[in-house]
Image (cartoon, rainbow, N blue to C red):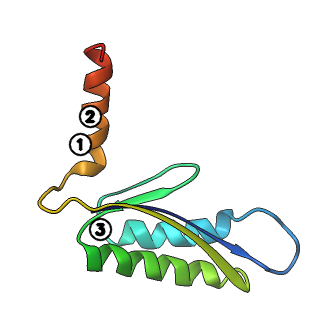
Amino acid sequence: MLVAFSVAPSGGPGGDDSVHDAVAAAVTIVRDSGLPNHADSMFTTIEGEWDEVFDVVKRATDAVGAFGTRVSLVLKADIRPGHSGELTGKVERLEQAIADGA
């Protein structure tokens, strides 16, 4: 499965609206998990089996919680049993379709 998620703290001290330190803590957990992943400016996507992916999401969310009194978590999942390599495979098929003029 693929899970794209965005996690951010709120209610922290100081009134600074930047969340990069909290996001860095979350992305470090994702990268250290060893699961295939990709981070961009809005979401982090991780690929693996249900239990291992959601364990990483939970640990990343817990890490972000240290930066505020509240945490916002947005998830989107693509659950496709029997498939792997979709983190890059979906993009490769899209690029091929564009190149083919679809």
Of mark 2 and mark 3, the one earlier in the sequence is: 3
Mark in front: 3 vs 1: 1
Task: Give the crowd class for mark 2: few <14, some 14-19, many >=20 residues within 10 Å.
Answer: few
Q: Is residue 65 above or below residue 19?
A: below
Numbered disc 2: secondary structure: helix
The structure residue drawn at horizontal position 31% and vertical position 31%, both measured from the top left corner, is 94
Dot label at residue 92:
2
Horizontal and vertical percent position of residue 101: 30, 13
The extreme left residue here reads 82
Instruction: Place residue 3 in its image quadrant.
Output: bottom left
Dot 1 falls on a residue whose secondary structure is: helix
Q: Which residue is mark 1?
A: 89
Location of the C terminus by quadrant is: top left
Name the residue type under label 2.
Answer: Glu
Q: Is residue 47 left or right of residue 44?
A: left
Decide: few, some or many residues near mark 3? Use Cα within 10 Å; few <14, some 14-19, many ≥20.
few
